[in-house]
Image (cartoon, grey):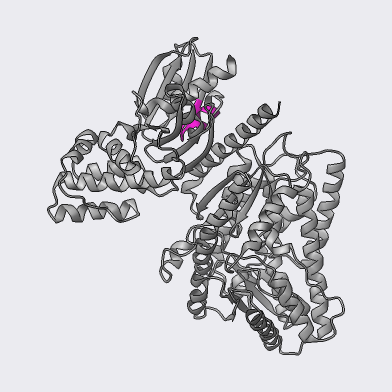
Amino acid sequence: MFWGVDIGSTYTKIIGIGKEREIVNMTVIPTIFNQDKIVGEYLADKEVKMLVATGYGRHMLADSHGAPVISEIKAHAKGAYFFHNDVKTVIDLGGQDSKVIKMGDDGGFTDFRMNDKCAAGTGKFLEIAANRLGLDMQTFANAGFEHDKELTISSMCAVFAESEVISLIAKKESLANICYGVHESIASRLASMAKKFVLNPNDCIVFSGGGALNPFLHHMLELKLERKILVPEHPQLIGAVGAALSGFEVVN
Amino acid sequence: MGVELHKDLLSSIGVDVERHAKMMGMGLAGYQAGFMSQPNRPKAMAYFDWFMSEIQAERIAEINALKAQKKPAVGTFCIFVPEEIVVGAGGACFGLCGGANPPIADAESELPRNICPLIKSAYGFKLQHTCAYTQSADFIYGETTCEAKKKTWELLGKHHPVHVMNIPHMKRERDLKMWQEEIKEFKEHIEEVSERKLSLAEMLEGVKVINAKRDAMKRLDTLRGMHPDIMPISGKDALFISQMSFLDDPKRFTQKVNELCDELDVRIKEKVSVFPENTPRIMVLGTPIAPPNWKLHTAVEGSGACIINEEGCIGHRYFKDNVDIEGVQSEDELYERLMKRYSKIDCACFTPNQGRTDKIIQMYKDRKADGVIYYTLSFCHTYNVESHLVTEALAKEGIPCLVIESDYSPEDAGQIKTRVEAFLESITFKQKAEVFANK
């Protein structure tokens, strides 16, 4: 078995692929303390031919398990290419990072852009806003479809954006409209990062990462970029798939 | 370490000795962990390791010994200072502390948060009294290279004497004429501080000393970066030497850099590299990297690449040009030659600044580099805005480029490493693809 582990800031994703490059194991666990140990325990009774780590915790696994590491960029590129081999651009929204990856014709990436340390363009931002409104992510996302007013969040800092949300609550704006505003803000950030790489109107774009599980964000992103965007079945696992595949390639 | 030895001196110049010792301890620990643990370093690095341990002790004692003889001590934050004049007067010209995160919170009590970390850090060091260089300076040399600095001098002037030189933002005839006047006025200010007249011969001697220092640094730059298969010294060590060029006595520094270069010459002959074969060679462009800001170099060289050149003010921009004193007969002629040399600096404060982009592309080709990282400090608007023009030109040439904006806080170290690793993956992929395509 070829394993790919993506230790993200919020969740750890584990993928196992077999001889025919088929996915045989798929696991998502919350990222907590000593995550490398937890991953080790999970894999203890399994056949491990190769283990490749990615995600912000990748070096932990390299240190404790001697696993080779690849960057999240390479992992998402490989993973997205596995599901859609005509992909030209990958947009990934994770817990603390967002990135846009420009793909070559053969599964390798040629360029990428990534948010800097500011949290305003990340999944964390959505989470903060949902918490503030007392909603779980799914309810929060779906509420956006009910909006009847196009509110905007103008602050470029997540902390100030949170206070903007609070002031919108105080102004008695509806839940749906606030949801819209928050999603609009993050979608326009992602879209402006992506615009540089999305050149041809027919190019295939893949949306990956936990953020792609959010249907309203997906919708807003399509509006902003004015084209169809594909979301694979398990978008949050794309990075782990990419890691597993790169291990597979080394051995085979 | 010598800080203990020079406790009385430090406290006599107003250093908060206890806090200072604590910060020095942190800096040294960082240096030991990040630099002294590198394998296979050139033996001549021993001098620079010693200098680091005495950076705010023995060197401070030397500067204060000069001051006792009425020789000027000038603290700076920029490479536009005509240091030849200070050195000609027998004095010391040195860069001030401004690369550490801890003083920033203090600075924000007087300065806005959204200006660059270098200015805030430097200002915080003054408020905290934790930089022995700042405390030793007869005056702080200020310049008008950016809005934030220009206005900060007015505030800093309340805490320490400041002399501001007006650096133009264009290089037209009338701007250059004004610049030459500014150099003359700077010399007069040095005379006021030293309480004596400065002769032409003394100034020419100062030029010779600084020219020799720049030659030594150019030699090091060539040795570290011009041999595609052998990198005889790490980029981190070379950066550190550049950083120290602003602090050490110029004559001693020149000698020590040349000794190091002699060793590197031998290494190149014997093919001794501190990096394995096919290590990607990266050039770093952009804003100054003041010590102890070693974040980027640590991320890059910890990810399997090597930095072969810094295009910044702490780096190539500082030492690329010399002052031509051939046939100079009068003071005015010398001021003109100084102005000519300083006006070749391609700081992003100038408009237009095409020369910088041309230089970068030429440097990239000469050094057979594999990619560049454009590094800017947050809120450093000139370099930040200019990054767009530079990266556009690089893209046209097919040169891989990564832009990183950061400050002195440690939080984004992991994020930067991710981006650097991905960038290196893309370079190696590109190399493989090119090899494949050429088959």
Give how far across and how far down residue B111 sits, in percent. 43, 70
Give how far across and how far down residue A252 sits, in percent. 58, 14
A205 in magenta: no
A56 in magenta: yes
Q: What residue appears at the point 46 percent right and 41 percent down from the top-left corner?
A: A197
Give how far across and how far down residue B118 sits, in percent. 53, 63
Q: How many marks?
A: 0
Give how far across and how far down residue B65 sits, in percent. 73, 75
Residue B276: quarter of image:
top right
Residue B439: quarter of image:
top right
B436 relative to B316, above or below: above
Q: Is residue B65 visible?
A: no
Q: With B401 as the anchor, is A245 left or right in this view?
A: left
Q: What residue appears at the point 70 percent right and 85 percent down from the top-left corner?
A: B184
Q: With A152 as the anchor, is A190 left or right in this view?
A: right
Residue farthest along the front direction in this orientation: A201
Q: With B287 as the anchor, is B265 left or right in this view?
A: right
- Say which of B350 and B56 sits in front: B350
Residue B77: quarter of image:
bottom right
Q: Which residues are magenta?
A: A53-63
